[in-house]
Amino acid sequence: MDQSSPQTPAVTPLAEVQGRIARAALLAGRSADDVTLIAISKTHDADAILPLLGQGQRHFGENRVQEAQGKWPDLRARYPDVTLHLVGQLQSNKAAEAVALFDVIHSLDRPSLVAALGKAMAAAGRRVPCFIQVNIGAEAQKGGCAIADVPGLLDAAREAEIPVAGLMCVPPADVEAAPYFALLAKIAREQGLAGLSMGMSGDYETAVMLGATHVRVGSALFGARG
């Protein structure tokens, strides 16, 4: 049979990524249901996001509060069951806006942000789960707290009544990610944390095999940005 026949439905990028997550989970003796796929929709407008919503994707990630404010209120009016994740760096002066808009924050990385988020959550009466971002490769140009600072930041977050979902990292570019994912998983175990936000388009299968509970996939779903 001609594989290009109109009767043969094309595999969507979403189905392809979901299938790869399922295979990686199977190899690791895990259930794919234990892995949340976050579609990173930063820089993409509503027209690019709607097809994924139509295919059933409900977790989306944005890098910037202002950009998310510009497109998600209308989209969520149509799809109220969306879970919106903030995956980019957060300025303390945007904490209240982030707490109002996002359902999960993946970039809690310093005491001043703990204070700002704790105050914003108390004022809003809304406790937003946060991942502590760890600078797993000790890179000067990247956000995230130092590995040695994780216990103290975790204690501060709990004292501020911020729900800590787990740890998040972005490994150094252009090197094998697996050792960094394994290290993050080890730190999380030592701190009694179950959540691991790690893995992007180029390495999410490796992340799933090493315990990721949340993978952040952009270009594999939306295509490379120009």
Image (cartoon, grey):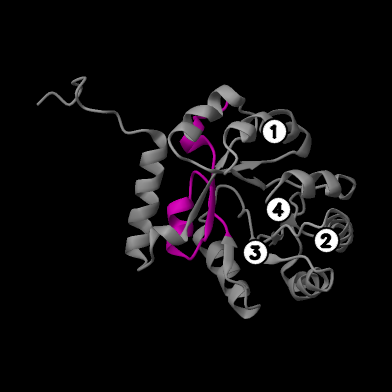
Instruction: Choose the circle earlier in sequence order: 3 or 1.
Output: 1
Identified by mark 2, the residue type is Arg
Mark 4 nearby-residue class (10 Å; few <14, some 14–19, many ≥20): many
**Badge nearest the viewer, 4 or 2:** 4
Q: Secondary structure at mark 3?
A: strand
Sequence-wise, which precedes: disc 2 or disc 3?
2
Frontmost of labels 2 and 1 is 1
Residue 154 position within the rendered picture, expressed as x and y whole percent measured from the top left: 76, 71
How far apart marks 4 and 2 lie (CA) works out to 13 Å
Residue assigned mark 3 = 167
User: Is 15 above or below relative to 169?
Assistant: above
Amino acid carrying mark 1 in the image: Pro
Lower sequence index among marks 4 and 2: 4
| Residue that extends furthest to the top in the rendered view of this protein | 6
Residue 34 appears in the picture as rendered: yes
Mark identifier at residue 73: 1
The local secondary structure at tag 2 comes to: loop
